[in-house]
Image: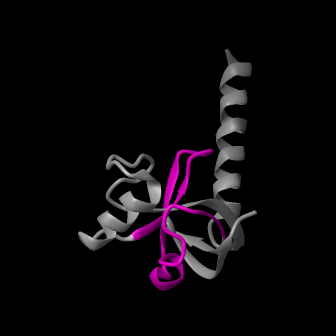
Amino acid sequence: MKKIAGGAALLALACGLCLASQEGGTATFTGSIGDSMCGLKHVMPGGDKACTQACIKEGSSYVLVDTSHNRVYKLSDQSKSSKYPGERVKVTGTLKSNTIQVSSLDAAN
């Protein structure tokens, strides 16, 4: 029982360190530009780009959708994001409270 508790404590510590290293320092995130209304999954017909554009027109914000980690990040720079609705991008910036302070945003290869 002590081994299990010790293992769980080490795992929790490792996860905490991983999150702490992501938050605060400059990092690169890869995902697609979506909208805050739909999040991980677009619900409107017409594809990701059309859905994102329609939701933005309704007042939604651009977000970075990382489906490989089931995460949605707010983006500080909405104007750079507007160039890539529904497209895969690479964002470099600082993560703070689920918002990426964008220093660069480019199409991902």
Where residue 25 sits: x, y (%)?
70, 73
Q: Nearer the viewer, residue 45 or 71?
A: 45
Q: Is residue 55 left or right of residue 93?
A: left
* Residue shown at 56% from the left, 47% from the top: 67
Where the C terminus falls, by quadrant? bottom right
Q: Quadrant of residue 48?
A: bottom left
Where the N terminus falls, by quadrant? top right
Where 6 falls versus 55 (above or below)? above
Q: Which residues are magenta?
A: 62-90
* Residue shown at 70% from the left, 53% from the top: 18
Q: Is residue 4 left or right of residue 99?
A: right
In this figure, what is the number of numbered marks? 0
Q: Is residue 16 left or right of residue 43?
A: right
Q: Tell me if residue 65 is in the magenta stretch.
A: yes
Q: Quadrant of residue 62?
A: bottom left
Direction top: furthest residue: 1
Where residue 76 sits: x, y (%)?
48, 79
Q: Tell me if residue 52 is in the magenta stretch.
A: no
* Residue shown at 69% from the left, 20% from the top: 4
Q: Is residue 34 left or right of residue 60?
A: right
Direction left: furthest residue: 58
Visual colour scheme? one colour
Where residue 77 sits: x, y (%)?
50, 82
* Residue shown at 39% from the left, 49% from the top: 42
Where 44 falls versus 95 (above or below)? above
